[in-house]
Each structure stands twice: as structure tokens, then as C-alpha cells.
Amino acid sequence: MSYQQPADTTVSPPAEPTTNMFQVSSHPLALLCLILFKACALGLYLLGNFFTNNFILIFVLCVLILAIDFWMIKNISGRLLVGLRWWNEVREDGSNEWIFESRDANVPVNTSDSRIFWTVLYGTPAVWSLLAIVAFFSLRFQWLLIVIIAVVLAAANLIGYQRCDKDQKRRWNQISQGGDSSFVSGMVSGLMSNAVSSGIMGRLFSRG
């Protein structure tokens, strides 16, 4: 008589669904624009020669994409992803004035969006600087023009958001310190008023 092994009825646990950075993002469209325009500019710079030998066309398209990327980060992506925005105005006397906007301290920010935003912001000028070194030593000076424009625009956004972030932390510290001092003064005044109303202060300063 043959023995038949029973079938394995063990049920494997369901696989955990994988999530990407766009699924956990609070503003996936802004995050996509943050990455897309940079990738397009880099791709066009590195691979443009495979499609056309017209350097003027590649130059114009690269500069146009870089300008759009600069504007998007300064005015939209930064405001939505990290709650920051900056711009620079020229006064009547010719001096520059930095103006910063930041979210309220009670408004939370998506940690994933913030991490990706700052990583991309710091990484972009580093990548273009590396390409500038390559273009210089390979004597591709006309391509170096594109890289210099890219470095200048990326560095401007980086410096602007660094100053904006420092300004935000400074104002939050002032608010918290002001809140602490007002809390202490309110507590002291409350104790004093209670003491006066209960007659403690009167007995303390009386003769007997």
C-alpha cells in the first residue's frame, strides 16, 4: 500500500506593496518637475550629439530647460515641498535685497519631499561642476558655456534656499523664545495677582 504525502497547505504571507517616492510625496507633480527638468537638461547635454550636430540648437534648448527648471524650483517646487520661497529685488539705490517666505511653524513638511529636495538641490551644482571639469580638460570650450550657465543657476537656487532656511530657523527661534518669555511673565504676574488677592503680600509688608 503506497503512502501519499499530504499537499502543503501553508499560505505564504502577502507581499508588502512597494512604494516609491512619488507615492509617499505630498506633492508628486512638484517632485516630478524637480527631477524631470534637470534630467532633460543633463540628457540633452550628454546625448544631444547623437541626434544632431547643431550645437546652437542644443545650446538654446539646454539654456531654455535650465531657465524653466530654475524658475520652477524658486517659485513652485521649494514652496510646495519644503515650504520655502526666496527672491531678490533691486532697490532704487542699486543695492540688492533678499526676501524670504517660509511656512508657519505649525505646518508640518513631508520628510520624504524635504530629503529629496535638499539632496537634489545640493547634488545638481556638484554634478554640473564635475561636467565643467571634464569639458575644460577635454578642450570642449563651447560646451563649457552650457555648463557654466547650469552651475550659476543651480548655485543661485542653492544659496537662496540656504539663506531662506536660515532665516526661517532664526524667526522660529525668536518666536519660541518670545513665547517662553511671555509664558514666564504671565505665570509670575498670575502668582503676584493671586498673592495680592489672598492678602499674602499685605501681611508680608505690614508691621506685625
Image (cartoon, rainbow, N blue to C red):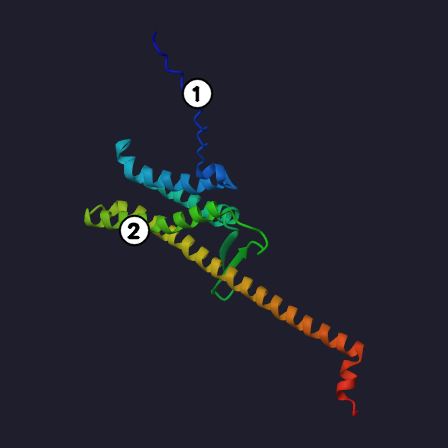
Residue ID for mark 1 = 9
Q: CA distance from mark 2 to mark 1?
A: 59 Å
Residue drawn at x 73%, y 77% as measured from the top left: 192
Point out residue 72 in the picture as x, y percentages from the top left corner. 47, 45
Q: Amino acid at mark 2?
A: Ser
Q: In which quadrant will I find the C terminus?
A: bottom right
Which residue appears farthest toward the front when viewing the image?
1
Taking depth in this image into account, of 180 and 178 the one nearest to the observer is 180
Which disc, if any, is residue 100?
none
Is residue 108 visible in the rendered structure shown here? yes
Q: Quadrant of residue 54?
A: top left
Residue drawn at x 77%, y 81% as measured from the top left: 200
Residue 35 appears left or right of 181: left
Give the answer, above or below, for where 111 lies relative to 36: below
Taking depth in this image into account, of 195 and 208 the one nearest to the observer is 208
Point out residue 4 in the picture as x, y percentages from the top left corner. 37, 12
Q: In which quadrant will I find the N terminus?
A: top left
Query: Which of labels 2 and 1 is toward the front?
Result: 1
Which residue appears farthest toward the top when viewing the image?
1
Residue drawn at x 52%, y 46% as measured from the top left: 80
User: Quick one: label 1, few (<14), some, or many (20+) residues within 10 Å?
Assistant: few
Q: Amino acid at mark 1?
A: Thr
Which disc, if any, is residue 129?
2
Q: Secondary structure at mark 1?
A: loop
Is residue 54 visible in the rendered structure shown here? no
Taking depth in this image into account, of 113 and 58 the one nearest to the observer is 113
Which residue appears farthest toward the bottom when viewing the image?
207
Taking depth in this image into account, of 144 and 126 the one nearest to the observer is 126
Give yes or no for contact between labels 2 and 1 (Cβ–Cβ under 8 Å). no
Give the answer, above or below, for where 190 lies relative to 103: below
